[in-house]
Image (cartoon, rainbow, N blue to C red):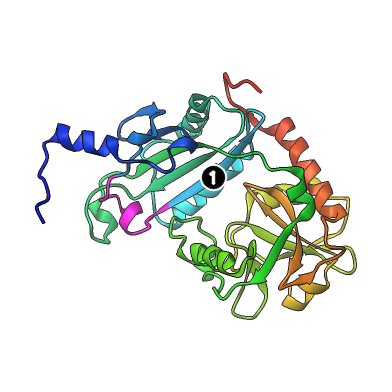
Amino acid sequence: MAVPVCSSEEYLQKMLAVPRVCAPEILAFYEHRVGAVCTDARLMFAPLDDHIAHRGDGVFETVKYSEGRLYQLDPHLERMRRSAAGLFLTPPCSWDTIRELTIEVAAAGKEPLGQMRILLGRGPGGFGIDPGECPEASLYLVASRFPATPESWFETGLKGFRTSIPAKQPYMAKLKNTNYVPNMLMIREAREKGADTPFCFDDQGYLAESAIANLCIVDASGTLSVPEFTQSLPGTTLLRALELLEGTLPITFRRISEGEIISAREVILFGTGPDCVAITSYEGKTIGDGKAGPVARKARQLIIADIRATGTPIPGVAV
């Protein structure tokens, strides 16, 4: 097999001609080494010797924006700061600069609805495992489209199931790092089973979380019960929803057994993408009356209002 050896210009032209499946969804992106924003998805690349690529040595956050406002930007960045500290990872610029860049990249995308992904990696430097190979951390920011979800989706709710993938170890569960192999396996299993939402459990058999979101229940007493964050990531949307719901119903953090999921009045998923959506069946058994319950509806209304009231405005984006 004779593989051509190309000049820099020839190779670049070949790269630009390669189809990019994600291209229609990409609005704008930034790489710290280049120091510029671009809107041509054909040029969105990461170096293979970045340890974020071949070791999963990095952290990330996804920030949703709606009506031209980034939601929970500062809580996301604060969690990212904690995750980076857990990996002894120092960004290549200040956290204030990362915040400013996030807003600028979202603005360059010129859409009122989308998602910002912020990725902080160990950086380019080699193909070993030693972080000392990498002289400076990498920073990538990507603004992408986020399709509007019909109201019928929220009212119908999602189908849940018990995944065969166990919850992450406590140390790793608290870091939003880029090694999402367990999460990927959960979603793959969901597709195989024709379900929507995997429920993973800790080694004691108690509910932990879903693949990319938090889960909680409204139990028989009407209390909103949230799994303890022992083997799950504290979600920014969930924590904000609990603040918004405070005083409207009892809220507690405790262990939740699988049996309580089936007998619950409501089971609710909180996450950056969907905000808040009901789980209306679990392992083929109907939860409640099989539709979104009053707490799920209330929480979603509060979150929508909170985005408008507290979201960080994106300059120059028409709503």
Q: Residues within 10 Å of mark 1 (few under 14, many from 20)?
A: some
Extreme-front residue of the structure? 1
Q: Residue at x 38, y 58 (%)?
A: 56
Question: Who is closer to the viewer here, 150 or 93?
Answer: 150
Position of 141 relative to 292 (above/below): above
- In the picture, residue 71 is in which quadrant? top right
Q: Which residue is mark 1?
A: 62
Residue 68's spot in the image, x, y percent? 63, 28
**Residue 57 drawn in magenta:** yes
Question: Who is closer to the viewer here, 177 or 290?
Answer: 290
Position of 16 relative to 161 (above/below): above
**Residue 25 drawn in magenta:** no
Residue 303 visible in the displayed image: yes
* Residues rendered magenta in the picture: 47-58
Amino acid type, callout 1:
Thr
Extreme-bottom residue of the structure? 204
Left or right: 300 with respect to 46? right
Residue 136's spot in the image, x, y percent? 29, 44
Residue 224's spot in the image, x, y percent? 81, 61
Left or right: 135 with respect to 155? left
Left or right: 57 with respect to 47? right
Q: Residue at x 40, y 40 (%)?
A: 140
